[in-house]
């Protein structure tokens, strides 16, 4: 399980770095909220020695959703916030069912939704960064071979 968590963390760090470099302030804030959420959830698991501390997961996801959905500036940011809301619903459903057989399914759903968030953050950052680069007048001058120093 810890190897899976390390891979998830590496993907999250890469997506957050893309958001910081290419995605703009909204996706940067989202990437930071996702990193803080992962850190808090991992800390809760390690301190409590429980893989399913759903109460803490729900609280941390609610905090992250609040940060992400506060003035969402892009569709990827809104999608990531909506996934957090679905995760909160997963936590509540697990609290109702709450048996050992449901724990694996619960953790798989959380992992899948987390990977969807990472993919959305990375994809949105690349798309947004590409759009900014194409809109840059400096790019078009370089592509046409124009030297801006001779103006």
Image: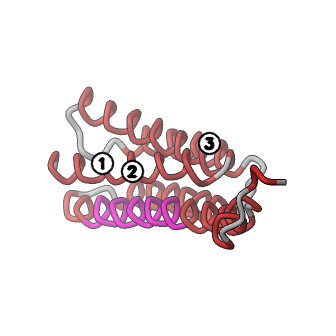
Q: Position of residue 91 (x, y in %)?
A: 44, 54
Closest to the observer: 93 or 106?
Answer: 106
Q: Is residue 18 magenta?
A: no
The total of numbered circles placed on residues is: 3
Residue closest to the far right: 151
Coloration mode? secondary structure
Which image quadrant for residue 20? Answer: top right
Q: Is residue 109 magenta?
A: yes
Q: Which residues are magenta?
A: 105-123
Q: From the viewer's perspective, is residue 16 above or below residue 131?
A: above
Residue topped by disc 3: 29
Residue topped by disc 2: 14
Q: From the viewer's perspective, is residue 143 above or below residue 3?
A: below
C-alpha separation, residue under disc 2 versus residue under disc 1: 6 Å
Q: Is mark 2 in CB contact (under 8 Å) with mark 1?
A: yes
Question: Of marks 3 and 1, which one's residue comes earlier in the chain?
Answer: 1
Residue topped by disc 1: 10
Q: Position of residue 69 (x, y in %)?
A: 69, 52
Mark nearest the camera among 3 and 2 is 2
> Under tag 2, what secondary structure?
helix
Q: Locate the C terminus and report the quarter of the image it occupies.
A: bottom right
């Amino acid at each position: 399980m810890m190897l899976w968590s390390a891979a998830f963390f590496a993907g999250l760090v890469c997506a957050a770095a893309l958001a910081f470099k290419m995605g703009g302030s909204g996706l940067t804030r989202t990437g930071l909220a996702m990193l803080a959420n992962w850190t808090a959830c991992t800390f809760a698991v390690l301190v409590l020695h429980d893989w399913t501390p759903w109460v803490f997961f729900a609280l941390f996801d609610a905090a992250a959703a609040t940060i992400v959905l506060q003035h969402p500036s892009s569709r990827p940011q809104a999608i990531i916030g909506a996934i957090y809301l679905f995760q909160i619903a997963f936590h509540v459903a697990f609290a109702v069912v709450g048996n050992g057989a449901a724990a694996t399914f619960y953790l798989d759903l959380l992992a899948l939704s987390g990977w969807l968030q990472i993919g959305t953050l990375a994809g949105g950052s690349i798309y947004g960064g590409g759009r900014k680069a194409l809109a840059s007048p400096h790019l078009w001058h370089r592509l046409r071979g124009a030297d801006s120093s001779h103006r």
